[in-house]
Image: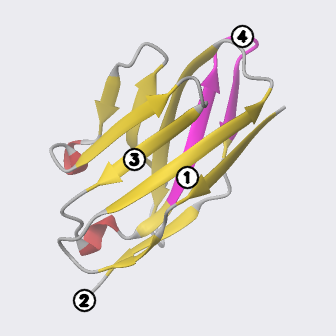
Amino acid sequence: QVQLVESGGGLVQPGESLRLSCAASGRLFNIRSMGWYRQAPEKERELVASITTGGNGNYADSVKGRFTISRDNAKNTVYLQMNSLKPEDTAVYFCNLVVLFPPATYWGQGTQVTVSS
């Protein structure tokens, strides 16, 4: 099994920054990617950013240029640096880990990010 523990959420004002962290533990083999999704009230969960083991990043158009995803493979940790936050970034952010074989997807418990003046 794989466990994902997120940290770093909170309440900030528009234009401020936050950094989310997600530490993975357990049976960490054949990892394809780690990433972040978010879900706002009454909306579907959506991809924010993901990064492969090789370091290739993928971003939602709405966060390009503001958010940066990175990972420390030695620590099995993925980070999401969020700058220039907007009220529409308010959501619960979930860490995600995808295993190639056997195929599996794991989720963290979620961390709340609220952007409000």
Q: Position of residue 85 (x, y in %)?
A: 24, 66
Q: Which mark is residue 63?
A: none
Query: Which residue: 42% across, 27% down?
Result: 51
Mark 4 nearby-residue class (10 Å; few <14, some 14–19, many ≥20): few
Report the colour scheme.
secondary structure
Mark pair 2, 4: CA separation: 45 Å
User: x and y percent of residue 27 in the render?
Assistant: 80, 24
The image quadrant that residue 30 belongs to is top right
Q: Nearer the viewer, residue 60 or 15?
A: 15
Q: Which mark is residue 117?
A: 2
Distance in Å between CA atoms under marks 2 and 3: 22 Å
Q: Which residues are magenta?
A: 93-106
Across and down, in percent, residue 66 comes to 19, 50
Which residue is denoted by mark 3 in the rendering? 80
User: Please, what is the three-letter code of the amino acid marked with disc 3?
Assistant: Leu
Instruction: State the CA–CA distance, disc 3 to disc 1.
Output: 11 Å
Mark number for residue 94? 1
Q: Is residue 76 above or below residue 6?
A: above
Residue count near mark 3 (Cα–Cα under 10 Å), binned few <14, some 14–19, many ≥20 = many
